[in-house]
Amino acid sequence: MTIRIAWGITGCGDKIEAIVNLMIELKKKYGLKVDVYTSKNARLVLKWYKLWDLIKDEFYDIRAEVDANSPFLVGKLQTGHYDMLLVAPATANTTAKIAHGIADTLLSSAVAQAAKARVPVYIFPPDNKPGELETILPGGRTLTIYIREVDVENVEKIRKMESITVLDSVEGIRKAIEDFVNKKQ
Ligand SMILES: Cc1cc2nc3c(=O)[nH]c(=O)nc-3n(C[C@H](O)[C@H](O)[C@H](O)COP(=O)(O)O)c2cc1C
């Protein structure tokens, strides 16, 4: 049975390269049908990290946000076209919207409407625990960033939401997909 995933990518540079590589690896390993939905800012960030061409080469169906309802991802989620919605990586911006019930962008709206229809939703916000982390800038230099309290608080709010699973690492994304695949087989 083919698992169909709507994979939302936001304008988040942190972990983006590892995530794109993981998408490709898991798609091939498990024969997943992965359709990519990008926020308005994701394309720009993917281009900064020189990953846009790779995404275009590897994925057949790539839809860019026009507005909250276009492309009509919500319809596809609520009618069972996809087995899950995964937003990875999720910016602090998209995470904050979801935490506060705001649904005015493609991916924040998709999360809200999918959760309401009890479609499994997974989200990986890299800024998910207090402290510092090393991120890779476009071009390869590393930068230490200090996670803001407000961003962690937003993640904690989402952890309490029904139908939404917060993933804390890139390996956590792998495990969630592998568990999902094993459960469906
Ligand atoms: C190169 C680049 C890298 C970025 N990386 C991050 C990031 O790691 N985390 C984050 O929260 N925002 C990051 N941003 C800022 C977001 O793209 C910005 O807040 C945007 O409004 C997010 O919109 P979205 O959530 O709809 O994708 C980055 C921006 C640029 C240009």
Image (cartoon, rainbow, N blue to C red):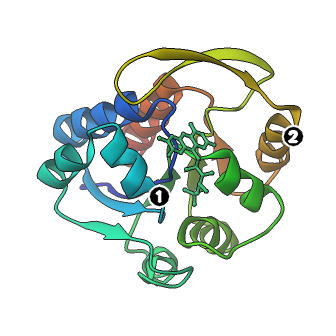
Q: Is residue 50 left or right of residue 176?
A: left
Instruction: Look at discs 2 and 1 and give the one toward the viewer.
Output: 2
Mark 1 closeness class: few <14, some 14–19, many ≥20 residues within 10 Å = many
Can the viewer see residue 185 in this picture?
no
Where residue 163 sits, quadrant-wise, is bottom right
Q: Which residue is mark 2?
A: 150
Relative to 57, say whether 82 is above or below. Answer: below
Quadrant holding the N terminus = bottom left
Q: Residue type at mark 1?
A: Met
Relative to 149, say whether 108 is above or below. Answer: below
SS for dot 1: strand
Q: Which residue is mark 1?
A: 84
x, y (%) of residue 110? Answer: 57, 70
Q: Is residue 101 left or right of residue 178?
A: right
Where residue 7 sits, quadrant-wise, is bottom left
Mark 2 closeness class: few <14, some 14–19, many ≥20 residues within 10 Å = few
Q: Residue at x 48, y 37 (%)?
A: 13
x, y (%) of residue 105? Answer: 60, 72
Where residue 174 sits, quadrant-wise, is top left
Relative to 137, say whether 113 is above or below. Answer: below
Quadrant holding the C terminus = top left
Relative to 146, say whether 179 is above or below. Answer: below
